[in-house]
Amino acid sequence: MITEQERSIFSITTSIYNWVRENLFSSPLNVLITLCVFPFAFYLFISSGDWILNKAEWDAITRNTRIFLIGQYPQSELWRIGTVAFITTNLLGISWHLKGVVFQRLSLIILVPLISVILIPPIFLDISIGLRSWFALVSMGFLLGYLLSKFQNLSTRVLLVSWSLSMIIDFILLRGIEGFGALPYVSTNEWGGLLLTFFLAIIGIMLSFPLGIFLALGRRSNLPFVKGACVIFIESIRAVPLVTLLFMTLIIVPLLLPEGWRLDRVGRAIAAITIFSGAYMAENVRGGLASVPVGQTEAAKALGLGPLLTTTLIVLPQALRNVIPAIVGQFISLFKDTSLVVIVGLLDLVGIGKAVVLGNVEYIDQQAEVYVFIAAVFWVFTFSMSYVSQIIERSLGVGDR
Amino acid sequence: MVLYRKGIPIWRDTKIISWAAQILSTILVISLLVFLISNLLNAANNRGFSLGFDFIHQEAGFPISESVVDYKESDSFLHAFYVGILNTIRVAVIGIFFATILGTLLGIARVSTNWALKNLSLVYVEIFRNIPLLVQLFFWYFIIFQSFPKVQDAISLPGGIYLSNRGIFLPNLVFSTESAITLFACGCLIILMIFSLYKITALPETYFARIKRILVYMASAITIVILVYVLTTQLQVSIDTPELGKFNFEGGLRITPEFAALLLGLTIYTASFIAEIVRAGIQSVPKGQYESAYALGLSKTETLKLIILPQALKVIIPPMINQYLNLSKNSSLAIAIGYPDAFFVGRTMINQAGRAVPIFGMVMLCYGLISLMWSVMGNLFNRKTNVGRN
């Protein structure tokens, strides 16, 4: 007699056996492929693991963590960055209970690396106590916000306002106010590292998104001149690489503006990134606009809505929802493209890496480690962005109607 | 034209509003342009730089590290820029070639029934498309190609290939002009032969078709005999292997580290996008299409050739052309690792001649033309296959 337990073990083994046979050894060719792929993958995995854990020397990164994170931002003003990070994690905690899992996943993506950095013992990760306590404090911000949201459930609208307000406060905090003692002015030229990368990406996204919507609406306009101007703008920007635009805003745009109208280098880089990304965004939004049936506009008109209300209340929400993947894809490439500012001499994450390697003789042998670290940082963020985009898509029910 | 209609107040009349908006926007855009251009002219006057193109025939006076055509420092700026454009085209064309092959293989692997292969390809795609191209370029250039040993102790690979920090040295085929022409003619003949052989397989079973087929077979046989004769006796080809000289390798084909890193980076990065396009294209053909093709008695190759590929290619080719355009534009990152493409040469020209505005115009025009070429190709394809009309 076969007992119940034996039968279940038997069924598990047969199902594993079936799975392996179907997915790995279903035909002679597949057997050959499997026999080639497995050793190759195994070798890659073992050798890269061996390199990361044993061979690689990570002091170029662990000894310069502060520079990688914030660049040349003055040491005496560190509390400002800590506050900004605190505000952000705090808001994330408050938003935890918001509908959908977007904020929960976002929080996890940010918190898991933070907490793991705090918890890894100093033998393995040689970073200063100060940095660890900063990270701990920032994580506490999340906990505080989470507890707050437990007691007082804030509405979406309040949260939206507080997020937008926090952006403004963050910017003022980081930049400081000229001639105000408590918050001395820190020129954006001193910003660097991950801080600058994030700054460029967030401001770029915030500016290029509305620009893209305006250009897309302009391209669909009934006024031939507006339409023509938008088409020429979009197509000529899309025709050239971002690097040329970065140099253009660096060298040519100051000549096109009257003397005295000067943007700093970071501002010029943001201008280039915004224009470039805005043109691509316009094409994405245009695709979304085209996907909204004409009946929607007609129905809105029949209900007595004017052109402005029809666009903002009826057409745009549907249009944008339809192209979320494309829009997030554009945000991801914008985030990756921020690395190009190193070519015009800004010290973003990549620029800092290059400076650390080339500036110190002791780290010249650790180039591989530095670039692998930078690649990993970029990878974590871009991959999370595409992951969050899938969640947003699901929570908005795209394709379910 | 009636300026106002009875009963409708002027500020509510859509006709008048649209005219007003039209005029207003025209004035706005034109005044913006006038504002920018007048500032430019002012700046040119005040700081004493010229906006003209008269400099392009002057001596360039800077070296370019690699070039397809002959170039020396005493050549004109125009010629230097031409060298840069050729370098851009060279890396873009070769990059597109390799990226297409690698990307297609990866895309097919993504829909493989083999779990291991499918996931290996997935890991490749997710890693390489999520890391900025610039970081990848730095990695290939500074860590791989710069870390090769000095020329004196270059790594020697079988087949006369040497890896050193001055570049990769390969044996080069050298042949005379006549041999080159002969080779070209042979190539054309082979293509013609394959094309006609392909054409006759599609002919229906008629009497004339049989005669045609026999004729083509005979012609092919004769062609092969001629080709074998020509290629074995008439060709003067020598292989030029790289030899270690006093300071560097002499002879052979040299691939500079800059070119190699740029090519590798562009290929690997773009292939990850092409893989996703190919995967989407293959998956866009419904399963029922395979099943009905088999039900109609078509063989596996016929199904693929006549049913699946035409439908999949319709979905694949437009975004593929977009990726080719992206690769061509991304080649401008050459400036980060010092490969002298159009943009890099343009930058050097600005330093040398000091004419930022016209040179930027030339660079932008160059990339604009490349983009235009790709979008014309995309449109031609769309018109030919009626994408979106069925």
Image (cartoon, coloured by chain):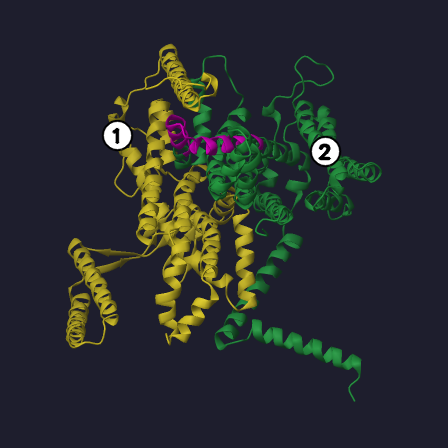
Chain colours: A green, B yellow
Q: Is residue B244 above or below residue A340?
A: below
User: Which residues make up the magenta segment?
Assistant: A206-234
Q: CA distance from mark 1 to mark 2?
A: 62 Å
Q: Is residue A249 above or below residue B145?
A: above
Q: Is residue B215 above or below residue B93?
A: below
Residue B217 is covered by the magenta coloring: no
Disc 2 residue type (three-letter): Leu
| Residue A367 visible here | yes
Image quadrant in which you'd find residue B40: top left
In percent of width and height, residue A158 lies at 73, 31
Q: Which residue is mark 2?
A: A159
From the viewer's perspective, tell me whether residue A67 is left or right of residue A321. Answer: right
User: Which type of secondary structure does the marked residue at label 1 adopt?
Assistant: loop
Q: Who's the residue at 43% across and 41% down the image? A: B330
Q: Residue furthest right?
A: A151
Q: Which residue is mark 1?
A: B76
Q: Who's the residue at 63% across and 33% down the image? A: A195
* Magenta stretch: dominant secondary structure: helix
